[in-house]
Image (tube, grey):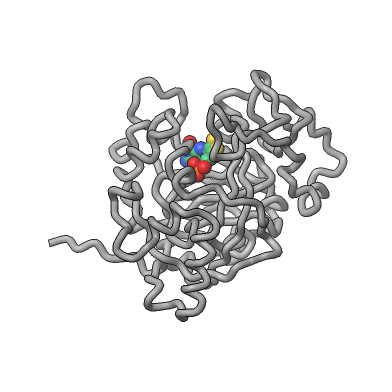
Amino acid sequence: MFIKKRPSWALPWSEVTPEPIFRDRRRFMVGSAGVAASLFAPGLLSAASLPVSGQALMSDRMPRFSTDEKQTPLDDVVRYNNFYEFGTGKGDPARYAGEMSVDPWSVTVEGACGKPGQYALEDLLKPHNYEERIYRLRCVEAWSMVIPWVGVPLADLLEQFEPTGKAKYVYFETLHDPEQMRGQRSRFSTIDWPYQEGLRMDEAMNELSFMAVGLYGKTLPNQNGAPLRLVVPWKYGFKSIKSIVKIRFQEERPKTTWEMLAPDEYGFYANVNPEVDHPRWSQKRERRLPSGLLSPNWRETQKFNGYGEQVAHLYKGMDLRKQY
Ligand code: MTE
């Protein structure tokens, strides 16, 4: 009989968390989202209440990298998604991403680095402590969320592979498995799979760039990109590639999925910029989720999604109207 083992990088609270910290975290969750609290109450976590149940993760809170803005309730975070591998509707990922198996998982590392190879996820993560960072993520479609992510700084993760001087860019690729990902076998899909993304090396090594393995204190739900995804908070959401299976260091700028699909609409840099409209809509404002017809919750979009202090220097001398 096949017994599904819990991945070794996911530990239950009871094993790893001193009780006062556990209680403190529970209070924090009750304060931030009632729905999160009920979903995380022991015994209540079920496949029916949460599309994919997570395992608890221990992490250090990072106030320096967090915002105290109101967090988006877990219910919205896991039910309103973009993950075209599972369909184009916002509810499709929650409905179908459970068809993807994320354990075991491995990541191929190649290109300009000293330690290429195929790494089991647990080996990749073993050297690191998890951090919790509360980041805003702003989607190109003008909605945004505030999410407590759990993960490791991307710079720390990449440094372990010893990138060489030739590594000017880093390329990421999502799993390509049409059997598990119904969007990849759809005859209506216009995307040339697998989903691909990239960052300039200095962007990747910036202190804000983050590789998430969890949110709201638990491993990522599949629809949010389990078991590991990028979070690049000053860029439009499409740069935050999900369910990564390949990392490549390279000298030339990689092609990215949205750039290939619609180069007039989506650029390589994709920095959040209210001054540069998308050809079909304005980028000046965003709907902060939860958002409804009667309370759309509009707010002004900030340049670099409000993270200019940390990242504006990366683009000195560039014309961000042309290099969008
Ligand atoms: N990664 C993959 N592999 N496939 C996708 O379709 N969508 C992107 C990004 N990462 C996408 C992806 C887009 S457009 C957005 S806005 C964010 O994921 C959404 O992340 P979320 O669903 O966790 O909010």
Residue 315 x %, y %: 80, 43
Residue 237 x %, y %: 59, 40
**Relative to 294, does residue 46 appear above or below in the rendering?**
below
**Relative to 281, does residue 52 appear above or below in the rendering?**
below
Residue 236 x %, y %: 63, 38
**Quadrant for the C terminus in the image:** top right
- What residue sits 77% from the left and 50% below the top? 311
- What residue sits 66% from the left and 59% below the top? 66
Residue 171 x %, y %: 57, 46
- What residue sits 57% from the left and 38% below the top? 238
**How many badges with numbers are in the image?**
0
- Which image quadrant is residue 8 in? bottom left
**Quadrant for the N terminus in the image:** bottom left
- Which image quadrant is residue 90 in? top left
- What residue sits 41% from the left and 24% below the top? 189
**Relative to 313, does residue 126 appear above or below in the rendering?**
below
* Closer to the camera in the image, 46 or 122: 46
* Closer to the camera in the image, 61 or 318: 61
